[in-house]
Amino acid sequence: MKNISLNIEKTLGFISKDAVYAYEAQAKACSEALHNGTGKGNDFLGWLNLPSSTSKEFIADIKATAQILRDNCEVVVMAGIGGSYLGSRAVIEALSDSFELLKEKKDSPVIIYAGHNISEDYLSELTDYLKGKKFGVINISKSGTTTETALAFRLLKKQCEDQRGKETAQKCIVAITDAKKGAAKVTADKEGYKTYVIPDNVGGRFSVLTPVGLLPIAVAGFDIEQLIAGAAKMEEVCGLNVPFSENPAAIYAATRNELYKNGKKIEILVNYHPKLHYVMEWWKQLYGESEGKENKGIFPAAVDFSTDLHSMGQWIQEGERSIFETVISIETPNKNLTVPSDEANLDGLNFLAGKRVDEVNKMAELGTQIAHVDGGVPNLHISMPQLNEYYIGQLFFFFEKACGISGYILGVNPFNQPGVEAYKKNMFALLNKPGYEEESKAIQARL
Ligand SMILES: O=P(O)(O)OC[C@H]1O[C@](O)(CO)[C@@H](O)[C@@H]1O
């Protein structure tokens, strides 16, 4: 079976291969620091061997819980934010039919998302939609105290109990949270919800291969064994003893750091299949929270092509030359559709008749690569044989491993996120949260 692969050829007009390979020893040292637990943030390395250490029994347990939700719910709301929802959403959206939500007959519960914003309109419309529906909730919060998620869950719990009764609600609400602390844990214990633990040593953005990602993905009807199998394969491919030249995680980490050193401060992750949109969102959090600190770090951005070629394409082609692109390319689409011939040919598209739509897409991809490289944008290329659970699992682990190495090359702790506390502190002070009296006074004085 093939693996996902990385090609850095189209960065080499901007940086040299020698410069990338000069990172070999450093990348190896960073990889060793990860594996030996000797680097910064070494209490958050539980993700490193997660795929290969996930047992069949554990998967079976997740699948059994997923089945209970599938049997008892027409809608399942996933309450979570950041790493507590982006990974599962990435897989579910990537693998679902683009028009699934519009279909009348559904094989799986409708999955919808909450707890990732504080919009009154959103939450009000959500509760309206859920009226009279047999719904369940997966409440995901590592800390168990995140305001966005806790607020949504408060509403959802009440509505579920009111509509379905306490006993059914108990069956249809599952908590995924810290082993010991946090409000989500306290509530789950009190109400007797089925609970899964997010291991202490796995941070939110590295948690997609824990129950955080696995349970919602299984509820949506996708193959979590294959997801784990793909990730486990990448664990091997990006392993500590794999030579630099064959290790895609090390090469990716080295290349992006070398580009950064050469003034390329923004990395744009690119897809040519809109289903990958949330894979990009997941990646943005992974790299943004891991590397953006100490006043450094590549800014992770993302675009959906060819859609955004008609909006952001101008900037990418001719704007400030501080960017590089990493394209995720899917070799073979899952569906087969050819362009029909048309007698009148009023649109002039008969030159495409008989070709697969994907051939047109691939030429858009190649044409764009050539244009952007000509325009001064280095291009990394990740090839994914197919869009399925196995290769998404590979992609996840590849990016996680590369992120650890890349963060260490940059010299930061890739496993903390102290910066996200600033807005929370101000919000609590502005809302007069008990315990924030001093901060409240101070912030009021500034208004
Ligand atoms: O799972 P939790 O603790 O609710 O956190 C959700 C997200 O919020 C953050 O902690 C940032 O505040 C992210 O790191 C995390 O993925």
Image: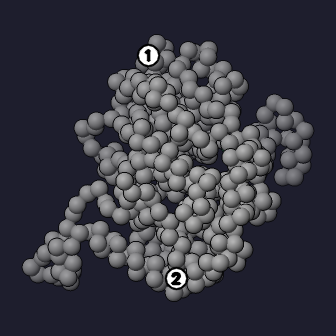
Distance between the alpha carbons at the discs numbered 2 and 1: 57 Å
Question: Residue type at mark 2?
Answer: Val
Q: Position of residue 12 (x, y in %)?
A: 58, 80
- Is 309 situated above or below 74? below
> Residue 415 vs residue 218: left or right?
right
Instruction: Give the residue at mark 1.
Output: 168
**Circle 2 residues within 10 Å: few <14, some 14–19, many ≥20:** some
Q: Position of residue 113 (x, y in %)?
A: 49, 40
- Is 371 situated above or below 166? below
Residue 260 seen in render: no
Going from N to C along the chain, the mark reached first, 2 or 1, is 1
- Is 365 situated above or below 110? below
The residue at the point 21 percent across, 63 percent down is 337
The residue at the point 50 percent across, 44 percent down is 232
Q: Position of residue 104 (x, y in %)?
A: 25, 40
Q: Position of residue 114 (x, y in %)?
A: 52, 39
Q: Give the total of numbered labels.
A: 2
Residue 67, picture quadrant: top left
Q: Are marks 2 and 1 in contact (CB under 8 Å)?
A: no
Front residue of 143/117: it is: 143
Residue 164 seen in render: yes
**Circle 1 residues within 10 Å: few <14, some 14–19, many ≥20:** some
Q: Secondary structure at mark 2?
A: helix
> Residue 294 vs residue 69: left or right?
right
Front residue of 266/437: it is: 266
- Is 5 situated above or below 12? above
Question: Residue type at mark 1?
Answer: Thr
The residue at the point 37 percent across, 50 percent down is 388
Instruction: Give the residue at mark 2.
Output: 373
Q: Secondary structure at mark 1?
A: helix
The residue at the point 57 percent across, 66 percent down is 245
Label 2 C-beta lies within 8 Å of the nearest ligand 1 atom: no
